[in-house]
Amino acid sequence: MSESIEHIKTLIIGSGPAGYTAAIYASRADLKPVLYTGMEPGGQLTTTTEVDNFPGYPEGIDGPTMMVQLQQQAERFGTDVRIGMVSSVTLSDEVGGVHKAVVDGSKEITADTVIISTGATAKYLGLPSEQRLRGGGVSACAVCDGFFYKGQDVAIVGAGDTAAEEASYLANICSKVTMLVRKGEMRASKAMQHRVNSIENIDIRYFTEIDEVLGDMVVDGIRVVNNQTGDKEEIAITGLFIAIGHKPNTDIFKGQLEMDDAGYLITEGKSTKTNKPGVFASGDVQDKEYRQAVTAAGTGCMAALDAERYLASVEH
């Protein structure tokens, strides 16, 4: 550990829409925030080519540009944005207590308040062809990107409620949706199964997995394999949606902060308060329902306001 320990008012962990929005509000409230970007500066949106559903961009904007602009806005008000990964934390149980964080395994920081905006990571199949075409037709968010495939044939991988919901959403705007289910039945609730089974332009393929995503720069098809017979088939599509779940980036908080069974941080009521005083959670790390940039930004604002009010209460 370094000998000199830096003390700050507000530490923001993570740099997506939630983290940067929290930084904007915290800076304007004179909380002098320090934001550590994490391994993926800008978060999930940096892998999204077009963002058309964030208010204020009538022509749309690409994800990386939007994140750079959010960072610049936060820095304009005085946020200290640093490249680095918070590798461990020790969170105080006491009101007015000091929280400790270690950055990149060596630098130690103490903070009066902590805003967690570490997000969630979409699970992918792990195929090289899938990873190569992320942003070129492979997406983990149908609500975010489905619009770009209006009137086209697409496929979706998954068998849970989220996959069923996204298949239904895509069926409203796409010509045909091929739903690939690895097992012989879906994990989705019976109500969701009835819904997808009743939609004419959804074709459900059971015992089916992707062998390869086809296309050079953009997706133009998939090769699937029946895992019972070994038979392979090529299906022409322009968009592939992966809906096999997300993993919240909460490993460093295990044993200290309350989480649900999936690892999402639990916040108090409509606030961003965690079970530790002075520690707040915003964005996808505590939201498994909506997972949109605009809702993440909204909770980032809430977290900064909650932090400001907490500091005011302990300082007086």
Image (cartoon, helix red, strand yellow):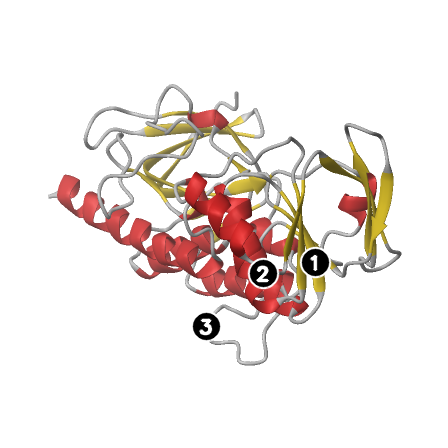
Between the residue at mark 2 and the residue at mark 3, the CA separation in whole angstroms equals 22 Å
Q: Mark 2 sits on what residue? A: 170
**For the point 58% across and 56% down, which residue is it?**
142
Q: Mark 3 sits on what residue? A: 55
Between the residue at mark 1 and the residue at mark 3, the CA separation in whole angstroms equals 27 Å
Q: Amino acid at mark 3?
A: Pro
Q: Amino acid at mark 1?
A: Val
**For the point 51% across and 69% down, which residue is it?**
53
61 vs 100, left or right, is: right
Residue 156 in view (yes/no): yes
Q: Secondary structure at mark 2?
A: helix
Between the residue at mark 1 and the residue at mark 2, the CA separation in whole angstroms equals 8 Å
Q: Amino acid at mark 2?
A: Leu
**For the point 40% across and 45% down, which residue is it?**
287
How far across and how far down the image is residue 225, in percent? 81, 37
**For the point 17% across and 47% down, which residue is it?**
312
**Res. 177 image quadrant:** bottom right
How far across and how far down the image is residue 303, in percent? 31, 49
Q: Mark 1 sits on what residue? A: 154
Q: Secondary structure at mark 1?
A: strand
Instruction: Give the mark nearer the N terminus: 2 vs 3.
Output: 3
Q: Residues within 10 Å of mark 1 (few under 14, many from 20)?
A: many
**Res. 296 image quadrant:** bottom left
128 vs 253, left or right, is: right
Of circles 1 and 3, the one toward us is 1
Name the quadrant of the C terminus.
top left
Give above or below for 22 relative to 114: below
Instruction: Give the mark nearer the N terminus: 1 vs 3.
Output: 3
> Front-most of 208 and 115?
208
Tell me whether the residue at label 1 lies in contact with that at label 2, contact meaning CB atoms closer than 8 angstroms: yes
Tell me whether the residue at label 2 lies in contact with that at label 3, contact meaning CB atoms closer than 8 angstroms: no
Q: Where residue 312 is drawn, which disc sits there? A: none
